[in-house]
Structure formats: structure tokens, C-alpha cells
Amino acid sequence: MTPLETFSGQFLDVCVSIALALLTVSFIIIVVRTVKGPSLPDRIVALDMLVAVGIGFIAVIGVSTGFYLYIDIAITLGLVGFLATVAFARFVLNRGLAGDKTIMDEVEESIKRREAGQ
């Protein structure tokens, strides 16, 4: 192997390790936001971000192992995650249109927080 190939292999290993570390930290932060989220829309966005981080994990592992079928799996997960987000958004919209007391209270609380500058 040439010195360039050796360097590029080591560089890729370091980049994969850094990417996995960053994805792990973001996964933990997103799980905290999902559990602690003050409203239903916040939790839905956090779940959508979990799908995105999952796609990142799959892609990094695919690059690491050299088995690029993982990239196709990540693309499929992205499509399913998009459809789930659209379904959740319609659910929240229908709850708001139906005058659901829970969602209306959350909306009013969010408006008050926004007006208070939080």
C-alpha cells in the first residue's frame, strides 16, 4: 500500500469514530427532549430527529463496513420517517381543528411563553 492509501484509511477510521461519537451525543440529547418536551409538537420534532440520527448511524456503519446496502436501508428509513412525520402533523392538525382541550391548552401556553419572551 502506498502512504496515501494508508493515510486515507486511517483518516476514514478517525472520521467514522468522530461521527459515531457525535451521533451518540445527539441521540442522547434528542431522547431527553423527547421525554421532557413541553408539548406534543416538540415531541414529534424530536422523534423526527431520532429518525434522522438513526439514518446517520446506518450510513456511518455502512461506510465503516464497506457494505453499501446500508445506504439503501437508510434511504428507505428516511422515506418512512417522512411519512410518519406527515401523519403526526395531520394528527396534531386534526386535534387542533376538533377543538381538543389538551392541544388548545398547549397552544395557549405556547403563545403566552412566546409573548413573555421565553
Image (cartoon, rainbow, N blue to C red):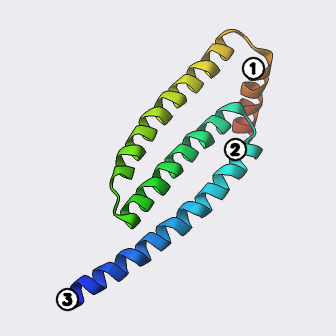
Label 3: element kind: loop
On the question of residue 118 being in view, the answer is no
The type of residue carrying mark 3 is Thr
- The answer to whether mark 1 and mark 2 are in CB contact below 8 A is no
Q: Residue furthest left?
A: 2
Q: Residues within 10 Å of mark 3 (few under 14, many from 20)?
A: few
Give the label on residue 104, or none: 1
- Expressed as whole percent of the image width and height from the top left, the position of residue 104 reads 75, 20
Q: In the figure, 19 relative to 91: above or below?
A: below
- Expressed as whole percent of the image width and height from the top left, the position of residue 11 reads 35, 79
Residue corresponding to mark 3: 2
Label 1: element kind: helix
Q: In the figure, 43 relative to 87: above or below?
A: below
Earlier sequence position, callout 3 versus callout 1: 3
Residue corresponding to mark 2: 34
Quarter of the image for residue 116 reads top right
Disc 3 to disc 1, C-alpha distance: 65 Å
In the image, is 97 to the left or to the right of 23?
A: right
